Amino acid sequence: MDVNQPNQHKPYKRILIKLSGEALAGEGEYGIDGNKTSALAKEIFDIHKQNIEVAIVVGGGNIFRGIRGVEKGIERSTADYMGMMATIMNALALQDACEKIGLFTRVQSAIEVNSIAEPYIRRRAVRHLEKKRVVIFAGGTGNPYFTTDTTASLRAVEVGCEVILKATKVDGVYTSDPKLDKTARRYATISFSESIRNRLKVMDQTALSLCMENNMPIIVFDIFKPGNLADLISRKIVGTLISNSEEVSFAND
């Protein structure tokens, strides 16, 4: 049995992709790179045409990161709201790239910006997904002190996704930082409880706890390697699976 994929014989029906702002970033990991955004839209198109319903939560760190604003003296709530606005900018950029290649897309924001995006309404989001529209969730949860990882966990549970695909710049979860520790090993599978206990920098503790309580598996993978997203949809072993299973295994064992 392929332990790295939940329900391996059953095709996915509905997934949530968690994108960091880095996935859209330009040089120096800031701004929005048109070529990167277009390439990402093409990968989303390729999996969407397999009759998979796709929801997306996008971060805003390539434009503004709330915690860095705090470090510069901005009050925490204000800084977090600024970060939420950055996620809306990224969502609109991704929507534009998707629609240019024929993907019907809706942006739903937890912060009301009615002239450019729909307000987040769960039932409407589900209906969009049922109609095979890509739904991009922006504006975080609409509240300060919560990360877009928590947003991804919350939205995935709310709209009934089967898995969260957390797109990062690393190829999975490691025992320690592989850039600093040459002996670091990559997990193939690990439990939520182990991730929380060891404080692995996968997602924040709130996001992991929410997924654990609602049995929402997460697969952490490298979005910058072409084909990884399609491979995950094909149930190939990519990245690290985090689930309620207590089995821990390492890549290449």
Image (cartoon, helix red, strand yellow):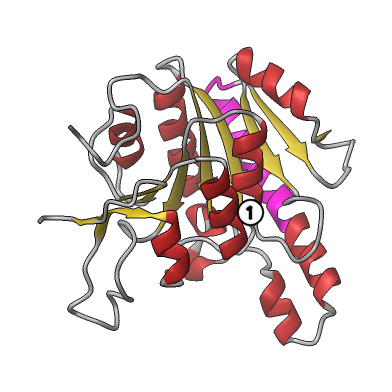
Q: Residue at x 30, y 56 (%)?
A: 171
Describe residue 29's horizontal placement relative to residue 127 as left or right.
Answer: left
Describe residue 50's horizontal placement relative to residue 181 as left or right.
Answer: right
Q: Residue at x 61, y 37 (%)?
A: 157
Element type at mark 1: helix
In this picture, is 193 found above or below 109? below
Quadrant in the rendering for residue 184: bottom left
Residues 27 and 205: in front is 205
Q: Which residues are magenta?
A: 86-103
Where in the figure is residue 166, as x and y percent of width and height?
46, 49
Whether residue 92 appears in this view of the structure is: no
Quadrant containing the C terminus is: bottom left
Whether residue 248 appears in this view of the structure is: yes
* Residue 87 forms part of the magenta stretch: yes
Where in the figure is residue 115, as x and y percent of width and height?
89, 36
Quadrant in the rendering for residue 126: top right
Where in the figure is residue 68, as x and y percent of width and height?
67, 78
Residue type, numbered disc 1: Thr
* Residue 58 forms part of the magenta stretch: no
Q: Residue at x 51, y 67 (%)?
A: 29
Q: Residue at x 72, y 34 (%)?
A: 107
Badge 1 is on which residue? 150
Quadrant containing the N terminus is: top left
Describe residue 67's horizontal placement relative to residue 38 as left or right.
Answer: right
